[in-house]
Image (spheres, rainbow, N blue to C red):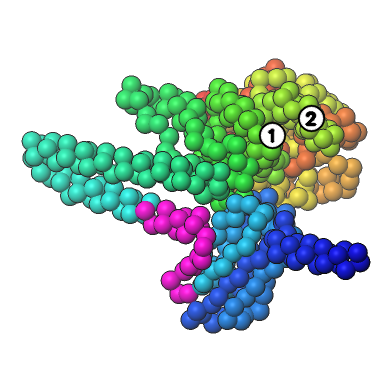
Amino acid sequence: MRKRILLFSLILCCILIGQPIFGQMDIRIKLTGITCDSVRIQSFNWKKKSGTNLVRPYQNEVQFKEKTALKPGVYWITTDTTQRGVILLSSNKQQMSITLCDTGLVFSKNPENTQYQEYNRMMKSYDQQLAALDKEFRDAQNLPQYMLRSIVDSLTVRAQRINAARAQYTRDLLSKFPNTLLASVVQLSRPMPELPQAFYGNFPMIQAFVMEHYFDNFPWNDPRIFNTPMAEDKLSYYCRELVYQWDRPELDTFVVKALEKAQVNPESHLLFFDRLERDLGFYMSDYKVEHTYIKMLQHILRTRPDIDAVRKTYYEHELKTINKNVDGSKAANFRYLTAQGDTTSLYDTQSEYLLLFLHNPSCSTCREVRRRMKQFSVLDAAIASGRLKVLTIYLENDRALWKHYLQSEAAANYLHGWNFDQSIENQDLYETRTIPYMYLLDKDKKVIRKNLLVNEIEDYIRHLGLAQ
């Protein structure tokens, strides 16, 4: 009986040893004709908080074997500091053999990555064909109109054939490699619908069309796509070149609609929100669009009662903070001490227009903004006209620092005040996480522009006709 038990145990042990352990990574890289000090596997990680960076010293064959699997996504194979190629990891089952040579990566029995290399080659070929047609068109510009018309017709037909071949190729790939990261990368790269001719020349309609259809082919059901530079490029362009550059509140509807589409997968929904927030909402971002971020926060709090308490508290605080003194609202009142030693308030400061400048005299960024403002002749002209006043407000509790500022740096044609009771910060009246922070107010202290940037000052003065 004991022998049978022992035999059974040996058989079971052999079976288990023969099976790949779930979550185990075993990536072998054979180097041919390449000399280096180290070989690395580096992850793409848009959050930039932590990323995989596995390093092995140089050998003819390097093995990366870990009990913990790599997170599915895109990874780079790097020798020293030279990126040699990209690999796609679709799952936690990561056994892979790669030959690395001067021409790139060669995969053994890995059809997904082999096909990804072919896909890149084919996309490059289609792009080159279209570029050749474009060159033919430009070279024909000096021909007579009747000849040019015939050439354009021919080029159009040829371009349509190339685009049709590209579309068919991508459809075939999607059918052949379902549920893989490759399929999601291919899906992501498919173009938007063509712009209707009726929209030509109407920029607001073009903006609305692009915003509405920008994510038509985004693979929301596959959260792995967020671990790829392809998705990062698409999302970065969306935030910085579309939402930020166009900056129209009426386009916020389309941002919310995109978030609603992402809800088909709860993980994708939060990853998408986080990525938008990094550019459009983070208070230190150069691309923040406050009215858009407000709509985003309202959406996430309304649609995701399942989010953890930390996220919920953070989002509620953010919404409360940035929803103050928004464009069109009346700015919060506060008291301040004038340079002459009198006590007054924002509401008692009379002017047709007021540029409210929250700052700290010792802040290097504040000092640079003040320096630039002193160079704006248009600003000086608007102040001289009597229609605009600039009011600088010191927020903290160092009277000596403020006095030194008044004596050494304060512009003579500005008003200068000190929020001596610290009510702005203590009562959270204004957003002061970053300074300087500027508001353009009208005579009733309604906000015309919140977070006015220094390079926008002259444009607003001209728009309002204050320097005439």
**Above or below 12: residue 392:** above
Q: Residue at x 76, y 50 (%)?
A: 363
Q: Secondary structure at mark 2?
A: loop
Q: Residues within 10 Å of mark 2 (few under 14, many from 20)?
A: few
Q: At which x and y percent is residue 36?
A: 57, 80
Residue sticking out furthest to the top: 444
Dot 1 and dot 2 residues touching (CB under 8 Å): yes
User: Do we see residue 461 in this rendering?
Assistant: no
Q: Which residue is mark 1?
A: 266
Q: Residue at x 17, y 36 (%)?
A: 153
Q: At which x and y percent is residue 9?
A: 83, 64
User: Do we see residue 363 in this rendering?
Assistant: yes
N-term-proximal mark, 1 vs 2: 1
Q: Is residue 116 magenta?
A: yes
Left/right placement of residue 467 relative to residue 157 reads: right
The residue stretch that appears in magenta: 101-122
Residue 416 lies in what quarter of the image? top right
Residue sticking out furthest to the front: 1
**Above or below 227: residue 57:** below
- Residue type (three-letter) at the residue carrying disc 2: Asp
Alpha-carbon span between mark 1 and mark 2: 10 Å
Q: At which x and y percent is residue 368?
A: 66, 50
Q: Foreground residue, 361 or 382?
A: 361
Mark seen at residue 306:
2
Q: Residue at x 58, y 72 (%)?
A: 29
Q: Foreground residue, 398 or 214?
A: 214
Q: Residues within 10 Å of mark 1 (few under 14, many from 20)?
A: some
